[in-house]
Image (cartoon, helix red, strand yellow):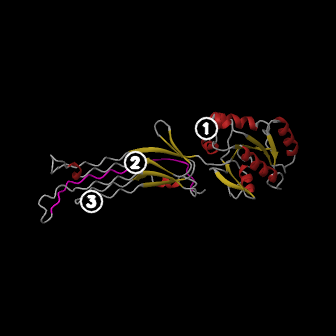
Amino acid sequence: MQGFADETYIDVSSGDGGNGCISFRREKYVPRGGPDGGDGGKGGDIVFSVRNNLKTLLNLKQKRVYRAENGENGRGKRQHGKNGADAVIEVPPGTVIKDPETGKVLKDLLEGNWVFLRGGSGGKGNWHYKNSIRQAPRYAQPGLPGEAIRVHVELHLIADIGFVGFPNAGKSSLLGSLTNASPKVADYPFTTKIPYLGMLVRGDQRRVLADIPGLIEGASQGAGMGITFLRHVDRTKILAFIIDLSDDRYLQAVGLLSKELESFSQDLAQHPRIIVGTKLDLPGTEERYQELTEAYPKDTVLGVSVMDGRGLEDLARTFLKESTVR
């Protein structure tokens, strides 16, 4: 995840169509060859192409201007001008294209290719305009111009289960223990500064887990790292509330986190959730885990310890089961 980028603006323009040609056939022994101007080529399109191997928008950060080729002009002997090459913009799954002024979503890209801007049509050559009255037309159609626009590009990571919690609650350690991810882990807050994805694999079952930077109370007003990264868990089937059982706010944490989620999106706040109490290996946390379970009787509440592995397999099975039925 080095060089992570999840938002940028790019300028895109499709190609102009080539002009039709004004030409007349001039060959020996053909005194009245007539018009033979060819058509102009079509301008290239702007195409967004989803690539599963991409995980960030870093390539769009490094190159912000994309122009498709113009179509070539037509030539004599009814030769058609070459069509302009498309400009193909490769993006990761979950990329959202927005109008930068209104914020309106133009396209949510999950797979395949999407032609965003069509290139201009090529103009017709003068041979099209010959008729019984006009035998030698000296007119050809000009090519149509392409389109140009600036767009806002955002990445919304696609995951089955999203981790939310306070800084230093053990989200990164849990992700590293359950998956192949290698997030930064340390004993100070905000070690996670960018989202991380990991693949939970058990047999032939696979689930994508997402860890985002920790929230703090007041995040919706910009405290800490804010709520910017919450869009990376808005597609998840389930939210995992990661609660540090060694933190004295262990009973209030779910409510505080839910409040920050609601400030970002009512829909996100209504996602199904699993409550995960962490650091069960520390003194006094077993009792706190029982209190947390009693405080949320309608929720699935599980306790884990990354240090001794306690509860990790139960949690993995729960993630697999719950994300299957959603």
Depth check, front residue: 130 or 305 = 130
**Would you name the residue on which mark 1 appears?**
222
Residue 109 pos. (x, y %): 54, 47
- Name the residue rendered at 62%, 40% in the picture: 227
**Would you name the residue on which mark 3 appears?**
79
Question: Which quadrant is the N terminus positioned in?
Answer: bottom right
- Name the residue rendered at 84%, 53% in the picture: 310
N-terminal-most mark, 3 or 1 = 3
Residue 117 pos. (x, y %): 41, 47
Q: Secondary structure at mark 3?
A: loop
N-terminal-most mark, 3 or 2 = 3
Neighbor class of circle 3 (other Cα within 10 Å; few <14, some 14-19, many 20+) is some
Q: CA distance from mark 1 to mark 2?
A: 40 Å
**Would you name the residue on which mark 2 appears?**
118
Q: In this view, which residue lies farthest toward the front?
A: 132
Q: CA distance from mark 3 to mark 2?
A: 23 Å
- What amino acid is found at the position of numbered circle 1 in the picture? Gly
Asked whether disc 3 touches disc 2, contact meaning CB atoms under 8 Å apart, the reply is no
Q: Secondary structure at mark 2?
A: loop
Q: Secondary structure at mark 1?
A: loop
- What amino acid is found at the position of numbered circle 3 in the picture? Gln
Depth check, front residue: 77 or 123 = 77
Q: Which residues are magenta?
A: 3-26
